[in-house]
Amino acid sequence: MHILNQNLKLIHSPEEKSQADQQDIALESSNLILSLDRLNQNQESALITVTQSGHSGRIYVNRGEIVRANFRALEGIAALKKMAGLLEADTTIHVTEVQETSDHRVDTNTILSQLKTFFSAQHQLLQECGSPQERLWLQDPESLEIFSSTDINRQILELCRKGETLHQLLMIMNQDNLEILVHVKELIQKQMLAAESLQELPEREPPKKSTFSRILRRMRKIFKKSHQRKSREEEALLVKSEQQSPPEHQKKLPELHTGVSELDSGTREKIRLYFKGKSL
């Protein structure tokens, strides 16, 4: 059996602490219904507080009889069912005398029988609807127009626009939990709702680089461009210099021009004879 209330605290009032039998009240399960059943059997008086996600309710038990219950705007058996059906509630039982009375007295054994039947039916429907912890998502916003603004189906779809778990749906909505679960099941079958695990996963975006990485990348680009620009400038200057300056073999031409290769034959003969005479 699914455990409804995760945290159960038993706090005795000062006058009750001296009674060993009161201190040893056996609340063997965190199931609120079993706790109420045990209080009824032991004819104990207690104030029970049930809280989940900021929503809270109270149950007043006078000598084992449930005399009053409220949860938000809900009263009586409707409030009891809502609190018993909460899946992640924090329940505190404060054993103390209760002065509350009921204008419409209902036999506690009858109430407990109804709660047990309700709990069993809810557990079955939860298994048919999937995991209570998994988010349900609206599949097509246009499907909202099928239902009127007061229709429970539309309320469920609206709450599931951005994803919602059954835990939260059962807590937020004031309708009977069984009614909510029946409609959720139908909406899933009609593919107006889908569990998160059945949603198409969006394409993963590439991870964003840090600011430092972006700055470093920009600096590299700047230096690269600067280096390329400098190389181009140097290359242009070299080409310009080559265009303006004659080649090396042309630079040596003036020396050749002063050589004997450009003298006429007569002059060369005179020079030869001059040097020949010198040598004699």
Image: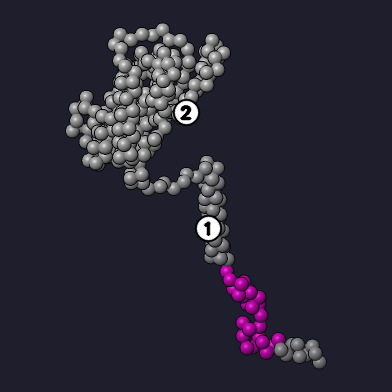
Crowdedness of circle 1 by 10 Å Cα count: few (<14), some, many (20+)?
Answer: few
- How far apart are the alpha carbons under marks 1 and 2? 86 Å
Instruction: Choose top left, top right, bottom left or bottom right for residue 61.
Output: top left
Amino acid at pointer 2: Glu
Q: Which residues are magenta?
A: 246-271
Residue that carries the numbered disc 2 in the rendered image: 28
Residue 158: mark: none
Residue 103 visible in the snapshot? yes
Q: Return the residue nearer the eye: 120 or 263.
A: 120
Residue with the most extreme right position: 280
Left or right relative to 252: residue 216? left
Give the image location of residue 270, x and y in percent.
69, 88
219 within the magenta span: no
89 over 67 or under it: above or below: below
Q: Return the residue nearer the eye: 93 or 154.
A: 93
Of the two numbered discs 1 and 2 on the same chain, state the one appearing first in sequence. Answer: 2
Residue that carries the numbered disc 1 in the rendered image: 232
Give the image location of residue 185, x and y in percent.
26, 37
Which residue is at a point 39% across and 23% down the rendered structure image? 37
141 over 71 or under it: above or below: below
Residue 222 visible in the snapshot? no
